[in-house]
Image: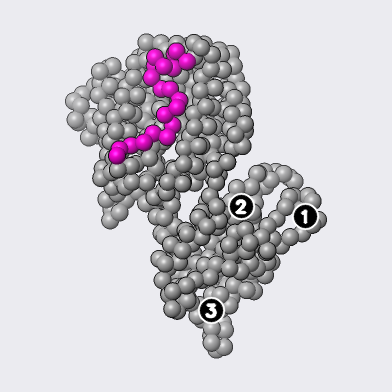
Amino acid sequence: MNTLDSSYFQQRRDRLAQQMGANSIAIIATSPQVYRNRDADYKYRADSSFYYLTGFAEPEAVAVIETFSSGQDYRYVLFCRERDRQMEIWNGYRAGLEGAVEQYMADEAVAIDDLDEEILTLLSNKDQLFYRLGHDAAFDARVSQWLKQVDAKQRQGGGSPAKIIQLDRLVDEMRLIKSAEEIELMQIASTISAKAHTRAMQMVRPGMMEYALEAELNYVFGQHGCVPSYNSIVGGGANACILHYVENNQVLNDGDLVLIDAACEYQCYASDITRTFPVNGKFSGEQKALYEIVLKAQLAAIHATQVGHHYRYPHEVASRILTEGLLDLGLLKGELNELVETEAYRDFYMHGTGHWLGMDVHDVGAYKQDQQWRAYEAGMVVTVEPGLYIAPDLEGIDDRWKGIGIRIEDDVVVTKDGPRILTHEVVKTVEDIEHLMSQG
């Protein structure tokens, strides 16, 4: 079982503290528990940036990183739940204060119930506060109250930080460039997700329900101790034209395509795969024609995901190929360059070609720098996912094209040697898909 040890998280805190500068403090809380309905909560998942810095997966926790005037050292304080035998009987074991120090390398651990009192001393007389404004309104209000309380003690030699700086500016950029260890975890997630998509292609049958096909994906995820990275999309027929279709409650009909956008996360690192294939195992002429255009666009966009190219370049490459293909099929009319310039393809392709991927499926990190699309750097991970969607109510289109939705998505690591596809283990050519499905 691949995982990151506690020293790895310490190295991240070292980097953050160095960027914070002297006499500063950073405060970051984990996600609150969320209830599904009465007496039932969702399975807990720690906040990604909090976990990135701590490796601590329990709820009700706050991490504080405090640098000193010398600028040479820092202190890491973890506020967390204490051990409680009765609560552990009901809800599972806790690390407690001793575990926070011994297992998670906190310099000091304090009971979370004492946060409102103890944080005032930590905040007092610091020059800068690094904090994630806007993530949680209730916690924002608590931080505001702490600052007011510290300022109220100015006559006793207190005083709140003079500057409040968005912590995400530092942590998001740290998270954007993945280490070799992180990429290995994402490779594991991608491999498991590829197995799930392969199983779905082998198990699908006309008359099957979309949710039954989703269950095949979840079976593979669960067999490897994983959970979905996001709500799975299993859209048969025209449902594939709904970009975020998650109801998954309709029959998969003979002659239709099914679009599956689904993947798992492993050790808090996500994968993201989309494949589109025929329910009966054989593409029709119209389905194949559109599919080949999308695949050509995707392969070219992957090739364009290179160090030095700007973030939007693969989208520009894919959009041009999709537009050219729509022209060839008569679904668009006009001059190619003008159609690309006016984005005439947007009736058929209305989303971007990718997004950052990491601990979150739509991962953090700025897409622009100085108002310009940023250049790809080694260690970035991005999805590449062009598509074509011929909505059933799209006017001026021959009926034989209507209700066909296609997207092909892979996860790509930018390297100095070119793009590395993490999700290559699930087939995507027409010939390979039909061959695999014929063996199911």
Mark 3 highlights which residue? 124
Which label number is shown at residue 241?
none
Residue at x-position 30% and y-position 43% = 416
Secondary structure under the numbered disc 2 in the rendered image = loop
Which of 54 and 278 lies nearest the eye of the viewer?
A: 54
Instruction: Please tell me which of labels 1 and 3 falls first in the chain.
Output: 1
Q: Where is residue 56 in the image (x, y as percent from the top left)?
A: 59, 55
Q: Where is residue 439 in the image (x, y as percent from the top left)?
A: 51, 12
**Picture residue at 54% right of the left edge, 75% below the top:** 123
Q: Mark 2 points at which residue?
A: 57
Query: Hey, what amino acid is under mark 1?
Result: Met
Amino acid carrying label 3: it is Ser
Is residue 368 found left or right of 438 in the rendered image? left
Q: Residue at the spot x=63%, y=67% of the render?
A: 109
Residue on which disc 1 sits? 87
Q: Do the residues labelled 1 and 2 touch (CB within 8 Å)?
A: no
| Residue extending furthest toward the bottom | 155
Q: Which amino acid type is shown beneath numbered disc 2?
A: Ala
Residue beneath the point at 44% across and 32% down? 423
Pointers 2 and 3 in contact (C-beta within 8 Å): no
- Say few, some or many: other residues with alpha carbon within 10 Å of mark 1 (under 14 / 14 to 19 / 20 or more): few
Q: Which of marks 1 and 3 is in front?
A: 1
Marks 2/3: CA–CA distance: 29 Å
- Report the Cα–Cα distance between label 1 and label 2: 17 Å
**Image quadrant in which you'd find residue 332:** top left
What secondary structure is found at the residue carrying circle 3? loop
The image quadrant where one finds the C terminus is top right
